[in-house]
Amino acid sequence: MICFRGRWVLPKVFLAYWLKRRGYRYNRRAFSTFCFTCRGYGVLELLAKAVAGRSTQRINDLSSQFYTVIPHAFGRKVLPPISTVDLLHKKTEMLNVLNDIEIALGMQKKPVTSSKTKLLPHPVDDNYNKVNADREPVSSDSKEFTFVEEYMKNTAASYYKLNLVDLFRVDRHGEAAKFDGHSKLKQRKLLWHGTNVAVVAAILGNGLRIMPHSGGRVGKGIYLASENGKSVNYCGWSGTTAILFLVEAALGKEHTITKDDWTIKAPPQGFDCVVARGETEPDPTKDITWKFDKHQVVVPQGKPLQQAAYKGNRFSQSEYLVYKESQVRIRYVLRVRR
């Protein structure tokens, strides 16, 4: 999804270029077939069992089957067997992205009916209306723009000099009602989520989701961060442009971990989220609060400080995990340039 003249446009032309850059070959027929990623997930499930059983022949056969279902662009090179857990996770994450692209392309086919006019809408307006969310530009001289920009710049990665080009408030249809189910959780924070330009439309239309085959260093949940420099690494750039989300997370009582645990599917009993504590965290003395609806939400503003208690652990920057989709509400979408 790309910003064009202040409007958000669903990806199509960008799709083939994006896939090629990541070693996949764009197959329009495959994308027009219902849930071709479902077949890919099925093969990966079988591959996971073969990898666990160290069955070389089975791994080679299933890898070949996967590459047939999900076309890759390796030229004349021999396609490598998917023989390690790490490679399995990478292929699964790629399928999650492809699944979101399928959703975005499906949204383009969805008809939009309106009784206000008999004229056909402009294609840009038509795509804009198919996204299941209201977006409102935030003025660059407003308090909101200022604290978002401060949050971005003070927690940015040293290797990127980001500029905030556009900031939009987001109200996803139906998300508020689900989020209200966690109104008793008072501990709330505005956190970063980086994603690929190609799947922004799907996220705005369907929200941040926990995919059936999701996984990562802190298990099967929605990954958020208190440092922009962490989330920006998950952005898929379109030239010099990237899209980031700022999400209100109802964190509640936090459970701390300091090493990887891929098996987590929910926080321990008595806790509402999991925080993988990093060696750095934005200076809490600089935090501000901003009222969203009826809740006060913490917004970090300080630069990251070394956390002596977590020095030398497995995470350089903190990751915040919730395991219920209803615990997050998208508040802003940012278009940035490097």
Image (cartoon, rainbow, N blue to C red):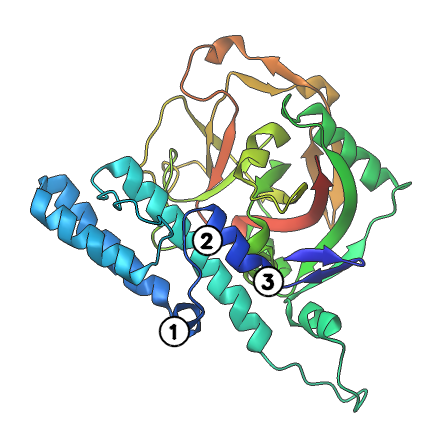
Q: Given the image, on which type of amino acid does mark 3 rest? A: Val
Q: Is residue 166 above or below residue 36?
A: above
Residue 89 vs residue 61, the one in the foreground: 61
One can see residue 227 in this view: no
For the residues labelled 2 and 3, the Cα–Cα distance comes to: 17 Å
Badge 2 element: helix
Image quadrant in which the N terminus is located: bottom right
Upstream in sequence: badge 2 or badge 3: 3
Residue at the spot of label 2: 97
Amino acid type at circle 1 is Phe
Image quadrant containing the C terminus: top right
Quarter-of-image position of residue 160: top right
Residue, disc 3: 13
Image-based side of 119 in relation to 82, left or right: right
Mark 1, Cα crowd under 10 Å, few <14 / some 14-19 / many 20+, is few
Tag 1–tag 2 contact (CB < 8 Å): no
Type of amino acid at the residue the image marks with label 2: Val
Q: Give the Cα separation between the discs numbered 1 and 2.
A: 16 Å
Residue at 62% in and 14% down: 305
In the rendered image, which residue does mark 1 sit on? 34
Q: Seen in the image, is 268 located left or right of residue 6?
A: left
